[in-house]
């Protein structure tokens, strides 16, 4: 047969075939043109075997790498990389911390040819991640979130900055950030208590997402968003609407992960920063350790020769709270130009809180940053619009107008606006009703707002966990949805097939039964008929009153859907000395354990001259005539094996055990 014909059949270039034939024991020389037909048949057979062997070797090596990477990740605490639904090859390489050509090669291994700017779907990225031992999770596209935040910031900056030198300055807006338990809430409470005007007005403390205090006859606005995990996305928005950030660091705990996160947010938003070293009343307080920790992050405070003001406080003992306020005013003066704002004309502001009140309906807090908002004004926030029926300040007092930097609760919305969106007053309501109103009517035909759930996307490898969600207020729905998005994995999709406000009705039960969904009732009742129908249709209903409990329940269910993890543990090695041939149930090979310990349940990989030849499992181990469970280094034994029959003397069997580990979401 012609060598070229042979090469064609083996799907390999002729020169490569000629080069590799000696390795397989056929020395035909580089100049040969033909080989005898019988030899050609032998070459085809051996070549095919070699290709199979090579594939197995690659797989074994890849499995080993994967196991190593997994073990390493487990030891180090896995760093989960968040990925958007689709991402460009360039960005993905960046996220994986690998060169673009390396990533392209990985993609190609999985049959994907992609150029640097091509986008790949999350599913593909997840397969590649698995191959290179990285943990990924589909989540909020950070860059999208950043993009939105930047757009918002741009819009806000544009509308709040004024070129007119005769315009007055508005009060500075302050956001308090820092690690959990370092005292943000305590500090906000302590600051609020310094406000004398509150005492005078009768002081009904209202949490509307922000409040104001007076210092030296000047107002300061503090954003006071809930510290719950589910609201963390709001904190980053807080940084955008603010003018000054206070970074709280506990004197006894120093710089912690969320301190670093907060610094990043503050720097991204280009906010002037004050460091408040809190809890200085504690015996373990070490402000210098905090300052040193901050300097390592390039946040160099004033008394360390830097420019960042630092105040040592105790929120608990109310020590030096006035000092913080003075520092805020000082920073406001330094940044006076940025605070100059138009007070006249239509108002613009940002929604910092929103929910449905049982009696009043949709309620939102807006922080005005330009113009003045009056009762009776028409307004629009995204798809939501209306006329201001009433406005309340942070003390619960009804007010008629709100000037820049005032947080104000508004009533008169036709739906719940999204936190972070911008409000504009003085809009043409008639026109809005015609355009937005029509679209909304179609979308919200009942109290239940349907979200898309593509049942066809459910497959065995990516099971979906379906949820029908009912809650008492819209703000909670949003918070729950955010928390659920955080626990979604690329393996198990959490599908919210329907969400809405109010009691659980028969319609919900039917819908849940159709989609095999679990109903989560958050502070929501179940009608008697619905309860009966749920029993008939075997629909599970979980009642929860705390977001944490709801999330824990979903987590437990989702964990059951995760494929268990296989972890490979290397055991011992045996050098094959003698072959005893086939017996009932397997092939018996004799040898010496040259490394580690081997158990009779282990599996093995066969190596010949460092090449992988095959794999199999142990049926039984004997030392002499006696059956044993384990053998150790130095033992000579006979092992009955299955799954591989081409064993030769001097082969090395490398044994391993496989642990099936239930996976959790942590
Ligand atoms: P946040 O999670 O950052 O909002 O922290 P909190 O304000 O809830 O405070 C966490 C814990 O630290 C609470 O038990 C507070 O009582 C305590 N704490 C806050 N400020 C101080 C302080 O200045 N001194 C002391 N000793 N404890 C404080």
Image (cartoon, rainbow, N blue to C red):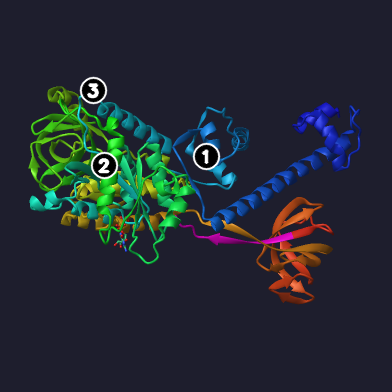
Residue 464 visible, this orientation: no
Q: Is residue 652 left or right of residue 67?
A: right
Give the CA distance from mark 3 to mark 2.
22 Å
- Count residues near mark 3 (Cα–Cα under 10 Å), then give few for <14, some for 14-19, many for 20+: few
Q: What residue sits right under mark 2 in the picture?
A: 329
Q: Is residue 133 left or right of residue 393?
A: right
Label placed on residue 95: 1
- Count residues near mark 2 (Cα–Cα under 10 Å), then give few for <14, some for 14-19, many for 20+: many
Depth check, mark 1 against mark 3: the one in front is 3
> Ligand 1 closer than 8 Å to the CB at disc 3?
no
**Regarding mark 3 in the picture, which secondary structure is present there?**
loop
Q: Nearer the viewer, residue 267 or 4?
A: 267
Q: Position of residue 177 (x, y in %)?
A: 34, 48
Point out the stretch of residues depicted in magenta: 654-666
Q: Nearer the viewer, residue 483 or 608?
A: 483
Q: Position of residue 25 (x, y in %)?
A: 88, 42
Q: Residue at 85% across / 33% down in the picture?
A: 18
Q: Residue at 84% across / 59% down in the picture?
A: 650
**Regarding mark 1 in the picture, which secondary structure is present there?**
helix
Q: Is residue 456 left or right of residue 402?
A: right
Mark earlier in primary sequence (3, 2) = 3
Location of residue 282 with respect to 31 vertically, above or below = below
Task: Tell me, yes or no, whether the two marked residues, 1 and 3, touch with CB atoms within 8 Å.
Answer: no
Location of residue 148 with respect to 312 vertically, above or below = above
Depth check, mark 3 against mark 2: the one in front is 2
Mark earlier in primary sequence (2, 1) = 1
- Count residues near mark 1 (Cα–Cα under 10 Å), then give few for <14, some for 14-19, many for 20+: few
Q: Quadrant of the C terminus?
A: bottom left
């Amino acid at each position: 047969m012609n060598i070229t014909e042979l090469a064609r059949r083996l799907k390999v270039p002729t020169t490569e075939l000629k080069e590799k034939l000696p390795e397989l024991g056929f020395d035909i020389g580089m100049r040969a043109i033909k080989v005898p037909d019988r030899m050609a048949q032998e070459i085809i057979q051996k070549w095919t075997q070699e290709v199979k062997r090579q594939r197995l070797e690659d797989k074994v090596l890849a499995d080993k790498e994967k196991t190593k990477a997994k073990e390493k990740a487990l030891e180090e605490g896995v760093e989960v990389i968040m990925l958007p639904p689709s991402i460009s090859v360039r960005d993905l390489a960046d996220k994986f911390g690998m060169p673009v050509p390396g990533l392209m090669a990985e993609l190609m291994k999985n049959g994907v040819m992609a150029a640097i700017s091509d986008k790949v779907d999350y599913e593909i990225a997840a397969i590649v991640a698995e191959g290179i031992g990285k943990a990924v999770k589909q989540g909020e596209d950070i860059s999208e979130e950043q993009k939105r935040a930047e757009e918002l910031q741009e819009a806000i900056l544009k509308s709040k900055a004024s070129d007119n030198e005769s315009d007055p300055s508005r009060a500075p807006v302050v956001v308090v950030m820092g690690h959990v338990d370092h005292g943000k809430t305590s500090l906000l409470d302590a600051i609020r208590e310094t406000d004398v005007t509150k005492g005078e007005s009768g002081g009904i403390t209202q949490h509307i997402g922000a409040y104001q205090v007076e210092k030296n006859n000047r107002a300061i606005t503090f954003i006071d968003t809930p510290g719950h995990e589910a609201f963390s996305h709001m904190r980053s928005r807080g940084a955008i609407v603010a003018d000054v950030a206070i970074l709280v660091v506990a004197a006894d705990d120093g710089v912690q992960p969320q301190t670093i996160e907060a610094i990043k947010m503050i720097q991204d938003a280009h906010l002037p920063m004050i460091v408040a070293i809190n809890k200085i009343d504690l015996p373990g307080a070490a402000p210098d350790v905090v300052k040193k920790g901050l300097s390592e992050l390039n946040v160099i405070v004033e008394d360390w020769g830097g420019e960042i003001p630092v105040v040592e406080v105790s929120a608990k003992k109310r020590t030096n709270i006035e000092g913080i306020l003075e520092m805020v005013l000082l920073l406001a003066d330094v940044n006076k130009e940025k605070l100059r704002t138009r007070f006249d004309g239509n108002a613009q502001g940002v929604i910092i809180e929103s929910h449905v009140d049982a009696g009043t309906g949709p309620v939102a807090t807006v922080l005005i940053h330009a113009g003045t908002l009056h009762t009776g004004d028409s307004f629009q926030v995204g798809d939501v619009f209306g006329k201001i029926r009433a406005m309340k300040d942070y003390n619960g007092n009804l007010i008629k107008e709100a000037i820049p930097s005032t947080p104000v609760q508004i009533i008169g919305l036709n739906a719940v606006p999204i936190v972070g969106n911008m409000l504009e007053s003085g809009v043409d309501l008639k026109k809005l009703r015609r355009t937005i109103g029509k679209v909304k009517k179609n979308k919200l035909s009942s109290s239940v707002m349907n979200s898309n759930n593509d049942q066809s996307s459910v497959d065995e490898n990516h099971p979906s966990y379906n949820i029908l969600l009912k809650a008492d207020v819209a703000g909670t729905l949003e918070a729950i949805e955010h928390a659920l998005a955080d626990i979604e994995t690329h393996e198990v999709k959490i599908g919210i097939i329907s969400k809405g406000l109010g009691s659980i009705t028969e319609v919900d039960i039917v819908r849940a039964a159709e989609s095999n969904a679990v109903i989560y009732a958050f502070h929501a009742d179940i009608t008697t008929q619905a309860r009966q129908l749920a029993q008939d249709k075997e629909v599970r209903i979980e009642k929860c009153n705390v977001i944490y409990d709801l999330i824990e329940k979903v987590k437990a269910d989702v964990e059951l859907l995760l494929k268990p993890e296989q972890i490979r543990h290397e055991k011992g090695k045996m050098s094959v000395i003698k072959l005893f041939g086939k017996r009932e149930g397997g092939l018996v090979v004799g040898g010496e354990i040259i490394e580690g310990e081997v158990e009779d349940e282990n599996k093995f990989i066969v190596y010949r001259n460092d090449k992988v030849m095959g794999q199999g499992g142990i049926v039984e181990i004997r030392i002499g005539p006696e059956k044993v469970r384990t053998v150790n280094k130095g033992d000579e034994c006979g092992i009955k094996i299955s799954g591989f029959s081409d064993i030769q003397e001097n082969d090395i069997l490398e044994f391993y055990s496989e642990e099936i580990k239930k996976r959790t979401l942590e």
